[in-house]
Image: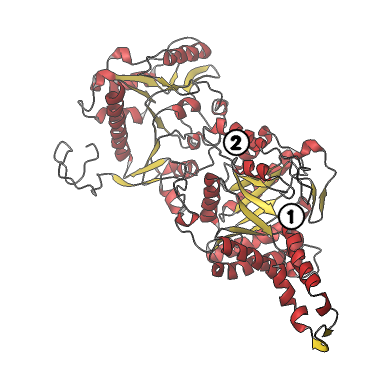
Amino acid sequence: ALLKCRHSDSNGFSPTCPASCTPRGAMSSFSLSDGRKVRVLQDEAGIGAAVCEEFIASAKAAIASKGAFSVAVPGGSIVTALANMPKDAFDASKVHVFFCNERIGDGKCYKGAMKSLVGPMGIPEAQVYKVGEGTPEEVAAQYEALLCGMPSNVVGKTNSGMPQVDLVLVGTGEDGHVCSLHPNKTEIKMAGSGKPIIPINEGGKTSITVSLDFICAAKKVVLSAAKASRSPMVLRALRSGSGCYDCPASMVNAANTTWLCDKDSIKGYQDKNVSDPAVAHLSSFWDIPGMKAGVLTGDLAWSLLQFAKTKEFAIPAFNCTSTSTVNAVLEAGMQLKRPVIIQFSEGGSAFFGGLSLHNKEKQASILGAIAGATYVRAVAPAYGIPVLVHSDHCAKKLLPWFDGMLEYDEYFFSARGEPLFSSHMLDLSEEPHEENIGICAVYLARMAKINCILEMEIGITGGVEDGVDNSGIAKDKLYSTPEEVWQVYETLAPISEKFTIAAAFGNVHGVYKAGNVVLRPELLGSFQDYAGKILQSSKPLNFVFHGGSGSEKRSIDEARTHGVVKMNVDTDTQWAYWEGIKKFYDDNELFLQGQLGNPKGLDKPNKSYYDPRKWNREAE
């Protein structure tokens, strides 16, 4: 009724209005993969009308179901817009008003609500809960007690005991602050603490604010963002899977969260042509919008990884060193009708380019990796499956190789609108933790510009792999901690959501007797729980499983349930490739002793046996 369409009468109602009609001011709506909804309005006035619409709908539903409606409101233009609600839109006697934040002794938000909401709508003043007086700690404790002591039909409680109101209305700042939760401040870093109300004392200016925990516990949250000045913030906040302290608005992810944006504030997001489809409800990866056979990059590659996490499977990543090994992996994917990841190590890349080439500056490894990725791009569509192309472990000493590949990605992006590779891995786990994360952050900022995915490693994978020997590493280095993993997320998420973490949980490269590798996949679950408590979300992290050879199936199966989206395979396929050749030789030994002469006759040729295509095919 408030967003009048062209069919409306003077009161804003039209019983004959067709379902396809777009209300005045409403331009579009869409959902993000994490479930948040976005409504795009024409302008700030349209947002104000939409706020009223959301308020009325929530109030009617709550009053009908439990006889009361509770709302937490901010100050400013959000509350001012509520003055436009029809006086008889709902039963005002059932409404209870709380405040998202308030300066102690000032009462500005209270006064604004009395003027624009309480008085005009006829809400009983006794049901408007003003912030009291005292120290910030005293006032916060008083307001928390007030919320917790309300009748259950007014303010409910979540399973964790957090007070739960029906609706929280939130304005957003250009810096992404919500309520009095400002970027990288103590108050937003209290997310996950379980405290509903937080005291603030900044240079003698005292106030209280609701916490992120309280906001996310609400049955519904509506955030508003108007004007072009908020466009960068909206672009940052709407990136699914990357909520963090740098932009508190990005962390608001209640079960029912709606963003109201105008055409100016949403413009940056729309200009990026972001593809962020919900995938949890899909039955097949082929149902992901835009899915195709061949190499995937950017948003589409990321959506496939998120689908894998949702469905609790890991996409296998095979180290390849030649067109023959690439073909073998693609053939297996085609037979199984499943996506695969082709990856090239630095040594494997050099081999692909040719070991006779000079490689002092890693030029042969750069050339080989580019050649390998280009070959995969050329043939992968014919195999009828989605494929990701990845570069494997890059230690600090190998950064020239990484730089060369990334430079070519940037060139490829300028010509094609996507990078050559789907993703790259930095393995700086041998460096100090802060240095590791810092270097990864620098590279991720560069990769984000071309929509490329970064895989990084913390802790150390033991054993020997491609010339890197970690067989003598201290055992404590084989296991990461929740704090270390969170530090990675906290640093990288503000840059891009497109990163995965190869966290150490006892992984060892190479081949070992089953049971000799002590994997602790439950650690991955603890990492998810630690981050999830802060972010108010389930399994926010994306993990990679390294060193799977010799792992017991139950450990692999458990790891899959904790957000592992990629599992590396190398040692086992190296043996499988050799085993095919060995078996062929054992079966045909007498035909492989010379060009002529075999059990069929001394002058019989053996070309059909020693032709490389023959035994290479057996290896494949």
Residue picked out by circle 1: 399
Identified by mark 2, the residue type is: Gln
Left or right: 82, with 388 as reference point? left
**x, y percent for residue 356:** 81, 71
Pick whichever, 200 or 362, lies toward us: 362
Mark 1 nearby-residue class (10 Å; few <14, some 14–19, many ≥20): some
Q: Nearer the viewer, mark 2 or mark 1?
A: 2
- At x 72%, y 76%, the residue is 614
Q: Is residue 297 above or below residue 561?
A: below
Left or right: 290, with 588 as reference point? left
Image quadrant occupied by the N terminus: top left
- At x 33%, y 16%, the residue is 128
Q: Residue furthest front?
A: 600
Residue 528 — which label? 2
Report how many numbered discs are placed on residues in the image: 2
Mark 2 nearby-residue class (10 Å; few <14, some 14–19, many ≥20): many
- At x 23%, y 47%, the residue is 19
